[in-house]
């Protein structure tokens, strides 16, 4: 599956940005713009998100989508920066195609089952009845009780078609059917990725916990695990400059 791509920069090395559930490539625009001074950067809409095609969900399929898209662009080797679901796609890429991944930055996710209520939220979203017409403010009011906060409602709203005959613009049915795949992590019998990896977690987030560290080091023996104090799961939005600083130090460090 060929994915929608936002491209910036013309550096000799390539960095690929992968968003989380209900996101899209442009959500990582601040980080992409920061890296574009030194790298060729690509922000992808993963399947069922943004402007990319829809279809069944698994991490193997999503990783294959990324490889097919980069093959089409003639890109052989690249670094990956992935948040949440996108971080799991990045991990799958590094493990399945290690010869193509130069570096991997995983933002606030572990190679483990890390649901934290997404399945329940998907069920509540599926129960929403859209009115005959919907504008932005009304959409936020409709989504906020399910999302639990205005910022999350704003994230979700980018996936809604507004105006007359509103509805989901993304592959919502595919995501809802396969949410267990997104929350989970496959049981892989695979060689570890020996390249440089940075796990950057939110200090106030429950997604990467001490009990995950052994599994991280089993699959990624050279992984560093850093925290952004007081940041939650959306650490790149909550502390963008601190995230950018950590990211660029990692990407620019010679290997």
Image (spheres, rainbow, N blue to C red):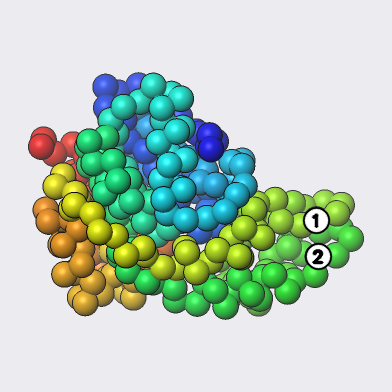
Q: Could you classify mark 1 by the number of other residues whose Cα lies within 10 Å: few (under 14), some (14-19), or many (20 or more)?
A: some
Q: Horizontal and vertical percent for residue 21?
A: 50, 58
- Residue at the image point whose x is 46% and y is 32% from the top: 69
Q: Quadrant of the C terminus?
A: top left
Q: Horizontal and vertical percent for residue 145?
A: 65, 77
Q: Residue 166's quadrant in the figure?
A: bottom right
- Residue at the image point whose x is 30% and y is 52% from the top: 91
Q: Horizontal and vertical percent for residue 12?
A: 26, 22
Instruction: Describe residue 240's horizontal placement relative to residue 103 as left or right.
Output: right
- Residue at the image point whose x is 26% and y is 49% from the top: 95
99 and 109: which is toward the camera:
99
154 and 73: which is toward the camera:
73
| Residue placed under numbered mark 1 in the picture | 166
Residue contact between numbered discs 1 and 2, judged by CB atoms under 8 Å: yes
Image position of 229 with respect to 17: above or below: below
Q: Horizontal and vertical percent for residue 148?
A: 58, 76
- Residue at the image point whose x is 74% and y is 71% from the top: 128
Q: State which tag comes first along the sequence, 1 or 2.
A: 2
Would residue 8 be seen by someone viewing this image from the given angle?
no
| Residue placed under numbered mark 2 in the picture | 130
Image position of 159 with respect to 35: above or below: below
Helix, strand or loop under label 1: loop
Q: Residue 52's quadrant in the figure?
A: top right
85 and 1: which is toward the camera:
1
Looking at the image, the residue that sits furthest to the front is 189
């Amino acid at each position: 599956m060929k994915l929608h791509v936002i491209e910036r920069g013309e550096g000799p090395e390539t960095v690929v940005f992968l968003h989380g559930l209900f996101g899209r490539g442009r959500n990582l625009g601040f980080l992409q713009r920061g890296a574009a001074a030194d790298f060729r950067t690509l922000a992808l809409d993963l399947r069922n998100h943004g402007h990319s095609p829809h279809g069944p969900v698994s991490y193997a399929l999503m990783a294959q989508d990324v490889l097919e898209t980069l093959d089409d662009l003639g890109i052989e080797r690249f670094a990956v920066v992935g948040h949440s679901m996108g971080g799991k796609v990045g991990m799958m890429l590094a493990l399945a195609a290690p010869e193509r991944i130069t570096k991997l930055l995983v933002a606030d996710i572990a190679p483990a089952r890390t649901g934290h209520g997404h399945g329940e939220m998907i069920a509540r979203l599926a129960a929403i009845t859209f009115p005959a017409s919907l504008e932005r403010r009304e959409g936020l009011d409709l989504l906020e009780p399910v999302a639990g906060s205005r910022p999350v409602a704003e994230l979700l709203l980018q996936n809604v078609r507004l105006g007359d005959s509103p509805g989901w613009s993304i592959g919502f049915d595919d995501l809802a059917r396969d949410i267990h795949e997104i929350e989970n992590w496959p049981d892989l019998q695979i060689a570890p990725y020996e390249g440089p990896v940075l796990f950057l977690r939110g200090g106030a987030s429950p997604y990467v916990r001490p009990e995950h560290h052994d599994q991280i080091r089993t699959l990624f023996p050279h992984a560093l695990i850093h925290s952004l104090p007081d940041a939650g799961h959306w650490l790149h939005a909550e502390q963008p400059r601190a995230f950018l600083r950590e990211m660029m130090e990692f990407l620019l460090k010679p290997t």
